[in-house]
Amino acid sequence: MPHFSVIIPTYNRAGLLREALASIAGQMFKDFETIVVDDGSSDGTETVVRSCGFGVHFLRQSNGGPGAARSFGLLHAQGRYIAFLDSDDQWFPWTLQLYDRAIGSNGETAFISGFGASADEPGESYANGLDQMTMRRYHSMLEACTGRMPPVGGTPSICVQRDALLQSGGFVSKRMNGEDTDLWLRLGACPGFVRILTPPVFRQRYHAGSVTRQLEPTVVGAWHLLQQERNNAYPGGPGYSRSRRRIICGMVRSVSRECLDCGRAGEALRLYWASFLWNFQLGNWKYLVGFPLAACRRGCR
């Protein structure tokens, strides 16, 4: 049984996938398996995987989105811990080594998260990544939610105990952005959360085809998070409601502004009012006052 299973969902990104796989082949820590889930590509993805130079489990499914692809890969994973990499991003050589050190720190560890660096940053900044490692341990991810942003740096920066991931239900198969945030919230009360503060664990690349730049699935994701919280679908109970709603409102604020920028004022205002009470309780006055004024200005043009 490998220590880690690395799952990569991909869709028509053969060129970028080649670089992502190269970053996995260069890992200092070697006890892992790699699973690539082709989400219905038509660009020679399988050829890239077969020629990458190391063993990869290649799976294929009809196009269902990244959440469904990750869940499909999870069904075939054998590792004790599951780590994810998007096919348009890259890991640093020390990424799995850092995860292993975090797991080996004191206490049970169910959930680990690091942060990403822009692909434009020079790699020399982190030449001694292992020597720069700093981390902080919390009872759970929800306990670490003390600021306006979640203490999780994106799917390519997380590593989760396989049993905890399966018990949470994995990623939702709905076509939406924010499926990762939904999962972090469902994992929020799992005991043992480690936040890797330095160095970064992946390079994030932005390009025109990035799923996160598509507005419609982002709107669907925002409404999904709101509805799940209203239905008490996330763990932690009333004691952690503020932590959960801080994360959810952060996404909703961002999506509502994006809707406004794209001329979808009606959708933007619906999101504003749907999250108004929680934003009020969190003291997000700048948004509560400034957003309707911005909407009015747009309407008067």
Image (cartoon, rainbow, N blue to C red):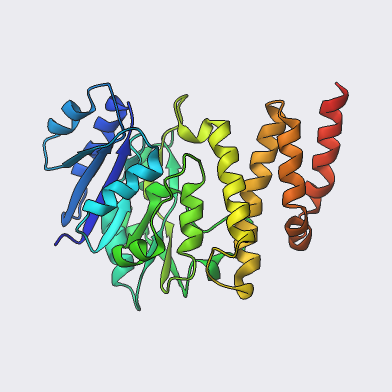
Identify the residue shown where x is 64% and y is 56%.
148
Up-down: is 255 above or below 165? above
Q: Position of residue 208 (x, y in %)?
A: 47, 24
Q: Is residue 85 visible?
A: no
Q: Quadrant of residue 300?
A: top right
Q: Nearer the viewer, residue 24 or 179?
A: 179
Identify the residue shown where x is 57% and y is 33%.
216
Q: How many marks?
A: 0
Position of 275 compared to 83: left or right?
right
Q: Nearer the viewer, residue 58 or 207?
A: 58
Position of 32 compared to 63: left or right?
left
The quadrant the N terminus occupies is: bottom left
Identify the residue shown where x is 72% and y is 32%.
260
The quadrant the C terminus occupies is: top right
Position of 216 compared to 275: left or right?
left
Q: Position of residue 209 (x, y in %)?
A: 44, 26
Q: Is residue 106 visible?
A: yes
Q: Nearer the viewer, residue 217 or 109?
A: 217
Up-down: is 12 above or below 182? above
Up-down: is 242 above or below 275? below
Q: Nearer the viewer, residue 273 or 104?
A: 273
Identify the residue shown where x is 33% and y is 53%.
129
Q: Position of residue 79 (x, y in %)?
A: 21, 59
Residue most extreme to the bottom: 107
Position of 269 compared to 216: left or right?
right
Q: Position of residue 32 (x, y in %)?
A: 18, 54
